Image: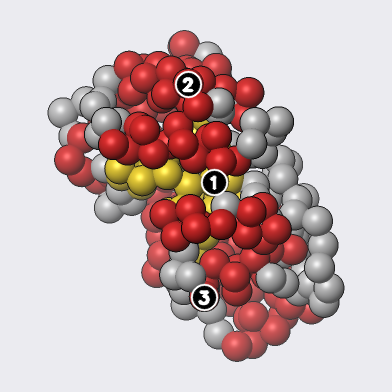
Amino acid sequence: MGEDRTKRAAEADALRAGLDLGMDLIDTAEMYGEGGAEEVVGDAIAGRRDEVFIVSKVYPHNASRRGVVAACERSLKRMRIDTIDVYLLHWRGSVPLAETVAGFEALRAAGKIRRWGVSNLDVDDLEELGAALADCATDQVLFSLEHRGAEFDLLPFCAERAMPVMAYSPVGQGGRMLRNPALAAVAARHGKSPAQIAIAWTLRRPGVVSIPKAAKLAHVQENAAAREITLSPEDIAALDDAFPPPRRKRPLAML
């Protein structure tokens, strides 16, 4: 979102439709559209701030002690809000994690953010946070049927600490995953689309938040309906055969 100003009104309408359907978490980042997506969010939530939980992310090169504060201020201005509910480090860069956390804590003390978290960090990175891990609200990672590496140790690690995991790109990229015959067969049994089954697959796990992109009203409505799907053991087994779960540690994938 936010990359084409001619689509801005329609994108904001799509976000508002999501709120109307009870999907009250909006995920964005300063990287998306180089701030344009946050401007769309600002348009969408005007007059509705109390209805929405906002997550945004800071570039790694802006994640120094002072840089993260300045970046957050810019994001707040673009969205025309006073506070971000959860502010994430988008991925790990050259800035030490402890320095980024110090910036996050300064923002929290100032009331600019309510909580902070991370994105695209694996178990060893989270362990490096040390005592600060207790204050980490979430880890947002690539998690879908075709990218299941987080299941091996990251999801159990976070579950043990009651830390929610946010699954981005749950319906994959480019449509290849959605054309899988096994996924299509499960979708047909439920009278749903493959994308809806893919979202339901992520949502079946306690503590996982699924954040599919939806820039069009039809996609928003389709995503919302995925909440109604309960996958059977037969469905899960078929999907496991087509998209095998990890049997060993793999590098955490990211897009």
Residue 10 in the image: above or below residue 116: above
Name the spot of residue 119 as percent of width and height, x first. 58, 45
Evaluate whether residue 58 shows in this view: yes
Q: Which quadrant of the structure image shows residue 249?
A: bottom right
Question: Residue under circle 3?
Answer: 160
Residue wearing tag 1 = 118
The one of 169 and 163 positioned closer to us in this rendering: 163
How far apart are labels 2 and 3 at the CA level?
32 Å
Where residue 134 appears, as percent x and y from the top left, is: 44, 60
The one nearer the camera, 210 or 250, is 250
Whether 181 is drawn above or below 8: the answer is below
Nearer to us of marks 2 and 3 is 2
Among numbered discs 2 and 3, the one appearing first in the sequence: 2
Q: Position of residue 232 (x, y in %)?
A: 55, 85
- At x 46%, y 11%, the residue is 6
Q: Amino acid at mark 1?
A: Val
Residue highlighted by disc 2: 66
At 16% across and 28% down in the image, what residue appears? Answer: 47
User: Do residues under tags 2 and 1 come within 8 Å of each other at their CB atoms?
Assistant: no
Cα–Cα span, label 2 and label 1: 18 Å
Along the polypeptide, which appears first: circle 2 or circle 1?
2
Residue drawn at (21%, 35%), measured in percent from left and top? 49
Q: Locate residue 165 relative to residue 177 in the image: left or right.
A: left
239 displayed left or right of 138: right
